[in-house]
Amino acid sequence: MTQKRIYVAYTGGTIGMLKTADGYSPAPGVLTHYLQQHPDFTRDEMPAFEINEYTHLIDSSNMQPANWQQIAEDIQRRYDDYDGFVILHGTDTMAYTASALSFMFENLSKPVIVTGSQIPLLTPRSDGQINLLTALYLAAQHPIPEVTLLFNNHVLRGNRATKAHSDGFDAFDSPNFPAIVEAGIEYRQLVSHRAAGEGVLKVSPITDQPIAIVRFFPGMDVGLLDYFITQPVKAIILQTYGVGNAPHKSQLVELLKKADEADIVVVNVSQCFKGKVNMGGYATGGTLAACGVISGNNMTLEAVVTKLQYLFSQQHSVSQVRQLMQQDLRGELGPVKSVG
């Protein structure tokens, strides 16, 4: 059997950091040298892999849409030469990157796995080694033809993942969609993955878009919303209570109508970790819908943000963006399909 070839895009993040006087920071050459010396990565069961260490390694808190474009185009250039792709990335914005790439790639037929670590690879008790070993092995032996996020032996759909723990090894969760795979002693596929795409891989562009996020809280002056409406924003994400409820105030109603008239897309996302928005459940939610606010359904905040950025980058009209935000494009709000 021909040995599978996996491409590794090393963008930065904790996994390859070293401790400095100012704290942990990305260190060029450290990760690549480690992998070349470590026997676990060259065992017969492992695929051949090539690491491309990016010239400017970054802490993922500095990640921008331009970096997503760089990663996507990097994979596109090498798409025909490799059987799968692993992206090493910092954890802080990993779920945003996984979500963004899931929208940017069309006709994807090979695995793209985003992973990293909570502790640097050269530090005792690092989770980096097992995360990277597992990602490489699964990309070759159990390929899932979509963008996924692998952490702590769980493979999550990229646009369903969110960072749930700041300092634990089980850093990511998928609150409204099961893990696709549990990689324990045995490989267990828990739900069906998306079907492999057909045709040539297409990478859609993504650029910075003016988007605001407003989180409601008791005692909040809803008049603050007027500031964002008068700014050149294209979308406002409302983080509301429960199933999508907000304070029943006439001022809020007037401001949301003002946003609708200004062709600003307003998306309702619940503050709750699990569940979905149902604006027809309570009068307060129904009021939002009557003002042109659309439901974020059960999407993660990361998925809503990156989906808006993706759609606006495609030059869609405001009405098209509103419509597409409520449609399942890459499994970000689709139903769960059981294995078999």
Image (spheres, grey):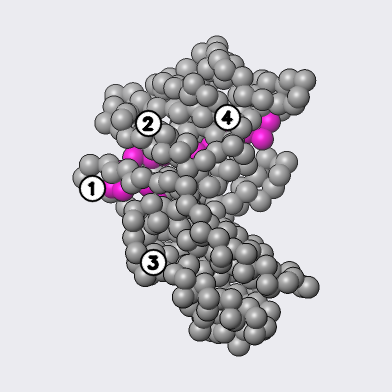
- Write down the residue under mark 3: 318
Would you name the residue on which mark 2 appears?
74
Which callout, 2 or 3, points to the residue nearer the camera? 3
Which quadrant of the structure image shows residue 201?
Answer: top left
Q: Could you tell me if the residues under marks 2 and 4 are in contact, i.e. CB atoms within 8 Å?
A: no
Residue depicted at 76% across the width and 24% down the height: 22
Q: Nearer the viewer, mark 3 or mark 4?
A: 3
Residue furthest to the bottom in view is 283
* Mark 2 to mark 1 CA distance (whole Å): 20 Å
Q: Quadrant location of the N terminus? A: top left
Q: Which amino acid does label 4 sit on?
A: Ile
Circle 2 sits in a helix, a strand or a loop, which is it?
Answer: helix
Q: Is residue 128 visible in this depiction of the protein?
A: no
Instruction: Kindly identify the residue that appears in the image at 40 percent across and 46 percent down.
Output: 206
Give the residue at mark 1: 198
Q: Position of residue 261 (x, y in %)?
A: 46, 75
Image x and y of residue 312, in percent: 40, 56
Q: Earlier in the sequence, mark 1 or mark 3?
A: 1
Q: Earlier in the sequence, mark 4 or mark 1?
A: 4
- Three-letter amino acid code at the position of disc 1: Glu
Q: Where is residue 244 in the image (x, y as percent from the top left)?
A: 60, 75
Contact (Cβ within 8 Å) of mark 3 with mark 4: no
Q: Residues within 10 Å of mark 4 (few under 14, many from 20)?
A: many
Q: In the image, which residues are magenta? A: 103-119
Q: Which of marks 2 and 1 is in front?
A: 2
Mark 3: which amino acid? Val
Which type of secondary structure does the marked residue at label 3 adopt?
helix
Circle 1 Cα neighbour tier, 10 Å, few/some/many (<14 / 14–19 / ≥20):
few
- On the image, numbered disc 4 is attached to which residue? 58
Q: Nearer the viewer, mark 4 or mark 1?
A: 4
Q: Residue at x 51, y 29 (%)?
A: 11
